[in-house]
Amino acid sequence: MNERFVKHSTFVVERTYAASPERVYHAWADPVAKAKWFSKADVFDFRVGGREYSSGGPPEGPIFTFDASYQELVPEQRIVYTYTLDSGGTRISVSITTVELIEVEGGTKLIFTEQGAFLDGHDTPEIREHGTNLMLDALGKAVEGEV
């Protein structure tokens, strides 16, 4: 039997975008806009209590499944959601994420905080933080008009 363990971690990633908080929030709230920088959702219900679900991956596998529930939404200011991430049918993490949008001169400061339970060594906080940085770079290109 494989050893079971949980690694808890919190990381924070900040970005400043040359786009209004309304534009950045819209990039999270609209399924067409979000698909430009995140995986295309199979289910997208952006409201408190709503769900976002997507499943996919490279042709050679594995299949990743993202299953989120929105806990709090404050338009143009804050998004809080919980989510699970599975890889090939194995649960690899459970997280709570807070996205804060703060208007600054010339755009929006985004503060992304993730608190995660990473399960049995299938994923690590370092890998997740790296992926989050890539995701937020893609978001920046989308909201700043490069995509």
Image (cartoon, helix red, strand yellow):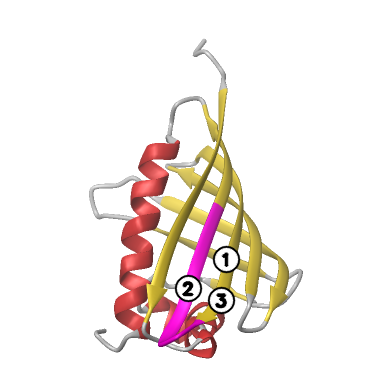
Q: Which residue is mark 3?
A: 102
**Residues under labels 1 and 2: Cα distance?**
10 Å
Instruction: Indicate which disc, 1 or 2, sits on the residue closer to the N terminus.
Output: 1
Q: Residues within 10 Å of mark 3 (few under 14, many from 20)?
A: some
Percent position (x, y) of residue 64? Answer: 42, 51
16 versus 85 height, above or below: below
Q: Which residue is mark 1?
A: 99
Q: Residue at 32% across / 85% down in the picture? A: 144
Percent position (x, y) of residue 101? Answer: 56, 74
- Magenta stretch: dominant SS? strand
Instruction: Indicate which disc, 3 or 2, sits on the residue closer to the N terminus.
Output: 3
66 versus 62 height, above or below: below
SS type, badge 3: strand
Q: Is residue 123 left or right of residue 43?
A: left
Percent position (x, y) of residue 54? Answer: 49, 63
**Residues under labels 3 and 2: Cα distance?**
5 Å
Q: Is residue 109 magenta?
A: yes
Q: Name which residue type carries label 3.
A: Ile
Q: Residue at 54% across / 89% down in the picture? A: 22
Q: Residue at 42% across / 73% down in the picture? A: 40
Q: Name which residue type carries label 1.
A: Val
**Which quadrant of the view contains residue 115?**
top right
89 versus 120 height, above or below: below
**Which quadrant of the view contains residue 38?**
bottom left
- Can residue 93 be seen in this snapshot? yes
Asked whether disc 3 touches disc 2, contact meaning CB atoms under 8 Å apart, the reply is yes
Q: Name which residue type carries label 2.
A: Lys
Q: Is residue 133 magenta?
A: no
Q: Which residue is mark 2?
A: 109
The magenta-colored residue range is 104-113
